[in-house]
Amino acid sequence: MKLFHLSDLHIGKRVNEFSMIEDQKYILTQILYAADQEKPDGILISGDVYDRTIPTAEAVQVFDAFLTRLSEQKIPAFIISGNHDSAERLAFGSSLMGKSGIYFSKVYDGTVEKIPMQDAYGTVWIYLLPFLRPSTIRHALPERAEEVQSAADAVRIALEQTKIDEKERNVLLAHQFVTGAKRCDAEELQVGDVDQIPAELFASFEYVALGHIHSPQKVGRETVRYCGAPLKYSFSEAGQEKSITVVELKEKGSVDLRTIPLKPLHDLRKIRGMYLEVTAKSFYENRDCEDYLQVTLTDEEDVPDGMAKLRTIYPNLMRLEYDNKRTRSNAEVRAAERVEEKSELELFQEFYELQNNQSMTEVQEQFVEELLRGMKE
């Protein structure tokens, strides 16, 4: 049995205020082409289908078109909700769509849905475990609420409640942070280790299709794997090659893995140098100037209107940074500052400047002040 493993589509995402929707349409078309060539028996999508719990109409239309094409190709899809998704919205119509081979995880109610698939070696069970928080288990299983202190407790109890026949071949879709995985800047972080799941919890599964971490990697054993996001969503991913993970299950205990590279519409990368260097034709003429870029200038003096000037060559410039004596000195001072001594507005101003490479306007500051005041009231 051949399966495609995908996750973290984040349809509708904006990166540094750039909409990624056209890039997402492009990469989903590539995935459909690969499916047409490879003829997988199913596609696993391990959460974070959308970038927000209430996706835009356009994002929903993009995913709907993708699923429609899969259905037309008679390729089943197995989809779970991630921490960015609304479990309730994603599960809407799941019973009806299951009849067309599109299986969504239901809102967790104390049971984990499983779907049987058949091949020459017998049955493969696909388990759909949606993103779990401790509160999810406490609500669904109040009799076990006192046992739940962390995400690891939540996943352990959910799997204990599930009847898993270890003589069969079992595949699990999960969207959690497994201990030992390497994070990227684009993922949500929690304080401490309350969100960490030990890989040992997945011992009963032939393959664990993980979502949540955007970098492709194994955790513990080869068959507990993050496939990574199909697109780069942060500059910490700039050096990665994105891909589809192909899982081939044979007899029990035999799993082969390989990847199919994905080429984005626009790459996301970093360039560095002095202003005159990065604007020289010899520097950029053999590179794709339409890529999403972070430019780090090493000039000691800031370039007036540097962002606007650079965008005449690099129209998709996302971030402009400086690396010189001044910025290194500022970085040392900022590192010594105590967060507790700053107001909410000051923290928000710093965050805005880091994201947008410019200060907030007076109107924006007034808006945030009113918003913070309303939240306190």
Image: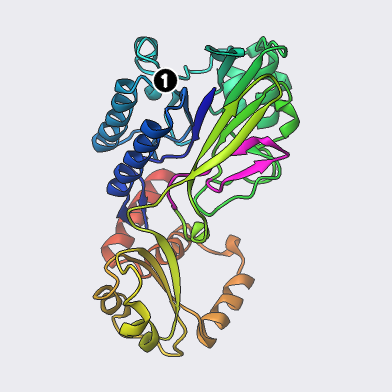
Q: Between 272 and 283, which is closer to the camera in this rendering?
A: 283
Number of other residues with Cα within 10 Å of mark 1, as a class: few under 14, some 14 to 19, many 20 or more:
many
Q: Is residue 150 visible?
A: no
Q: Position of residue 270 (x, y in %)?
A: 45, 69
Q: Given the image, on which type of amino acid does mark 1 rest?
A: Pro
Q: Secondary structure at mark 1?
A: loop
Q: Is residue 154 left or right of residue 314?
A: right
39 drawn magenta: no
Quarter of the C terminus within the rendering: top left
Q: Position of residue 249 (x, y in %)?
A: 60, 25
| Residue beneath disc 1 | 76
The quadrant in which residue 274 appears is bottom left
**Residue at 27% from the left image edge and 30% from the top image edge:** 65
Number of marks present in the image shown = 1
Q: Is residue 60 left or right of residue 169?
A: left
Quarter of the N terminus within the rendering: top right
Which portion, as a residue range, is magenta? 214-232
